[in-house]
Amino acid sequence: QVQLVESGGGLVQPGGSLRLSCAPSGRIFSTYSRAWYRQAPGKQRELVAHMINGDSSYYADSVKGRFTISRDIAKNTLYLQMNSLIPEDTAVYYCFLRTGQGVDYWGQGTQVTISS
């Protein structure tokens, strides 16, 4: 069973930066879309950034200009570069992948905490 493995979360002060990474534990033959979601305590999971067929197509208004989604094709790794972090960015961040056959994969989540 292929899983998505995330890394890069942690505790950072307001104004700081983090880069999240997400890679599958095994081979996935076709990818249609990849995304980052987050879920803050007491809130619903929300879409942060989204790529379809390698093109970044969406950013939540709350992160535009601060977050960048990207991928390394050779490593089959998805990244989320997060700059100018604010306390409201505190959440568990999840990566997501949908294959060309419509199969969905989720990461286990990585905690991001913004606090002074």
Image (cartoon, helix red, strand yellow):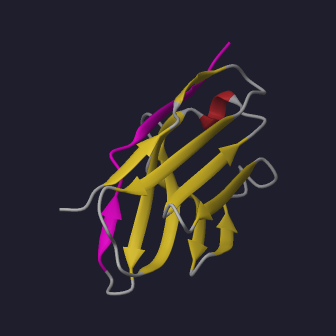
The front one of 47 and 43 is: 47
Outermost residue, left direction?
1
Q: Give the residue displayed 34% in from the left and 58% down from the top.
A: 106
Where residue 49 sits in the image (x, y, percent)?
Answer: 61, 61
In the rendered image, the vertical position of residue 14 relative to residue 69, given as above or below? above
From the viewer's perspective, is residue 82 above or below residue 24?
Answer: above
Residue 35 or 71: which is nearer the viewer?
71
Residue 46: x percent and y percent?
51, 55
Q: What stretch is highlighted in magenta?
A: 103-116
Furthest residue to the top?
116
| Residue 82 falls left or right of residue 65 | left
Q: Give the answer, above or below, for where 50 lies relative to 62.
A: below
Location of residue 56 by image quarter? bottom right
On the image, the x and y values in percent for residue 89 come to: 62, 37
Task: Count the labels in the image.
Answer: 0
Q: Quadrant of residue 115?
A: top right
Residue found farthest to the bottom: 101
Indicate the quadrant where residue 82 lies. top right
Q: x and y percent of residue 80 in the render? A: 61, 50
Along the horizontal axis of the image, is 66 left or right of 79? Answer: right
Residue at coordinates 62% horizontally, 41% vertically from top-left?
A: 19
Q: In which quarter of the image is the C terminus?
A: top right
* Residue at the image point whose x is 42% and y is 36% from the top: 42
Q: Nearer the viewer, residue 87 or 31?
A: 31
**Of all residues shown, which one is farthest toward the front?**
74
Can residue 73 be found in the magenta stretch? no
Does the segment drawn in magenta span residue 114? yes
Quadrant (top left/top right/bottom left/bottom right) for the N terminus: bottom left
